[in-house]
Amino acid sequence: MELSERKKKILSMAIEEYIRDCSPITSGAIKDLSNIDCSTATLRSELNALEAMGFLRQLHTSGGRVPTAQGYRFYVENLLTGIKATNSELEEVRKLIENRTNSLSELVSGIAKIVSKATNYPTVIIVNGIENLILQEFKLIPLIEEKVMVLIGTNSGYITDTLNVKASQQSCDDASNYLTKYFKGESIGFMTKNLSEINEGMNGEISNFQQIINSLIGGLKKFNQRKMLDIRREGALKLLKSRDKKETEKVLELLDDEENLVEVLQEQDLDGIKISVANDDCEDCSVIKAPIKVGGAQLATIGVIGPQRMDYEKIASALKVLIENLEKLKGDKS
């Protein structure tokens, strides 16, 4: 739908003011806040037109207007152009990624916590591309009670797992060296698909740690299918203090429903930041999500969850900083 530049400016101002203080916008307020060169009567006529188009709605006769879902969608799709990556709070992301000793779970949790703090909204990360991680090294450590701890070094930190198998220190060392030798530089997906085949051709070399390899094959397949989910609810406190009680309840319900969260966030090959605006009937939540990519391949999806009235520009800017720095810093790692 084509809008004049004046209508776009008025709609943008109406939405941004409503996001800021939850107050319906009036023609008088627009006159006071803007440098639009026209009368209050003309502004009132423009608001009436935007309401007729479905972008705004009037709560009470002769009262101010608030955005509709259609208005929000037009705003995020047409008026949020040239998002600036200027959120200085996400400097913490750089420090987190530069720490090469982080486990993958610590990295995921840390990123979610930082974004939630920066945006003041609940944040969720789902790891849905573990098979894309590039292997760097293996460390196998025998434990008591016939178990072996596995530390898998990747280009995005360590993954840990425990195998239910009895093994000596020497067998663990041999297995560590063997796995590093044959799979360093390959993806976890490649290893999962090819380990069994390579295993069959190397029986002589791995006879003393055959059980470890067999157990690792099964463990990796299960791990590859698992969805690592990290939910940061810190931003929910801000929502509880807001006036959007019904929408806040929907957000909190979604955060407690992990199965639904996975469905909302799971999206492979996500290209850039994607914004979904909640419907006017409040059956859905608004979600702003972005891919976390390592070496060009998607590892995870991060989503910021909130009500229809949320600061889309601030959140999109924060996610832009995040994904740009993740890709840059991960690409620099050896």
Image (tube, grey):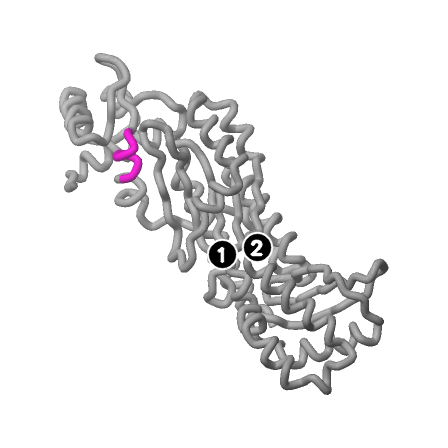
Looking at the magenta stretch, what is its main secondary structure? helix
Relative depth, front residue between 134 and 188:
188
- Would residue 69 be found to the left or right of residue 120 on screen? left
- Residue 36 in percent (x, y) is at 21, 31
Report the quarter where the N terminus lies. Answer: top left
**Image point 84% across, 72% down: which residue?**
169
- Quarter of the figure with residue 256: top right
The number of numbered badges drawn on the structure is 2
**Image point 35% across, 21% down: which residue?**
23
**Image point 28% across, 17% down: which residue?**
59
Label 1 near label 2: C-beta < 8 Å?
no
- Quarter of the figure with residue 137: bottom right
Residue 284 visible in the picture = yes
Q: Which residue is mark 1?
A: 292
- Residue 112 in percent (x, y) is at 56, 46
Relative depth, front residue between 14 and 39:
14
Q: Which residue is mark 2?
A: 226
Q: In the rendered view, tell whether residue 286 sits above or below residue 30.
A: below
* Callout 2 amino acid: Arg
Residue span colored magenta: 68-73
Secondary structure, mark 1, is strand
* Callout 1 amino acid: Ile
- Quarter of the figure with residue 194: bottom right
Relative depth, front residue between 24 and 169:
169
- Would residue 163 be found to the left or right of residue 220 on screen? right
- Residue 266 in percent (x, y) is at 45, 51
